[in-house]
Structures are given as C-alpha cells and as structure tokens.
Amino acid sequence: VQLQASGGGLVQAGGSLRLSCAASGRTFSRHAMGWFRQAPGKEREFVAAISWSGSTVYADSVKGRSTISRDNAKNTVYLQMNSLKSEDTAVFYCAADRRGGTIFSMLSQEQSYDYWGQGTQVTVSS
C-alpha cells in the first residue's frame, strides 16, 4: 500500500482544513487508516483513526473539532479539521494498518500501522 497525503497549508487560527490521503492498491477497504502528527521538537502523536468498518476514534486534543472519514470507492481517507489552533501546527501523516489485522483498541498506537505516507505540513497562524 502506498499513501499520498495532501491538503496541508497555512491557515489562520479558527480556520479549517481538510486533509486527504490517497491509497494505492485494491485492498484499501480492508485497512484501518490513521492520522498522526509531529510538531517541531516533539514526538509523533496520534490524531484520529477509522476502522475498515467505519468506526472512529480521536485524540482528546482534536475531539469535537475533527472528523475522520473514508471513501472506499476513491481509496481515500480524509481528516476534516475545524477551529484550528496554533498548537495544531505539525506535519500530518496518514497510515494504514496490515489488512484487517488491528483490533479497535489499538488503532491509536503507531506500531499498529505498517504503511505510512510522506506527510503534509499544517501551519496555523495565531
């Protein structure tokens, strides 16, 4: 599985962005997908994930402000982010798990994912 993230950019605080992650291959619908981010000087952290069946989980830091969704016909997962804050500034990465292999409670863990995209920069100006 190859992943291509896009949609990042510069936005003012309070604004919105929608990130996209396009996946190659025929098995996209069977993979759980996740979004992670890494801010300067910090470790990469979990943002949101969606199981192959559509169940979702969010980090507390983005809960209520973000929505993860998937379009299996387009092999794409999305992350809609609203009410952006300066602390959301980071490189955002999408990831895919091994097909069908991850239990839901583990979707927030980096080690659950085998495939990673290249990252897209999100910068929120205050």
Image (cartoon, rainbow, N blue to C red):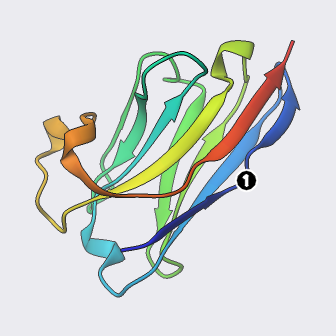
Q: For this view, does 25 lie left or right of residue 78?
A: left
Residue 56 % position (x, y): 35, 43
Residue 10, horizontal then vertical, whole percent: 85, 35
The quadrant where residue 67 appears: top right
Q: Callout 1: helix, strand or loop?
A: loop
In the image, taking residue 125 as reference, residue 107 lies left or right, namely left
Q: Nearer the viewer, residue 119 or 77?
A: 119
The x and y percentages for residue 110 are 27, 38
Specify the farthest residue to the bottom: 26
Packing grade of label 1 (10 A; few <14, some 14-19, many >=20) is some
User: Which residue is painted at 29% across and 81% down in the image?
Assistant: 27
At 37% from the left and 44% from the top, the residue drawn is 49
Picture quarter with the C terminus: top right
Horizontally, residue 4 falls left or right of residue 9, namely: left
Relative to residue 106, is residue 43 depicted above or below? above
Up-down relation of residue 50 to residue 109 (above or below): below
User: Is there any visible trace of residue 58 in the rendered image?
Assistant: yes
Would you name the residue on which mark 1 appears?
7
Image quadrant occupied by the N terminus: bottom left
Q: Amino acid at mark 1?
A: Gly
Q: Find residue 5 and report its horizontal and vertical position in percent.
A: 59, 58
Task: Determine whether 102 is above or below 110 in the image.
Answer: below
- Displayed quadrant of residue 15: top right
Image point (16%, 38%), residue name: 106
Q: Name the residue located 43 percent from the left edge and 28 percent from the top edge.
A: 44
Asked whether the viewer can see residue 107, the reply is no
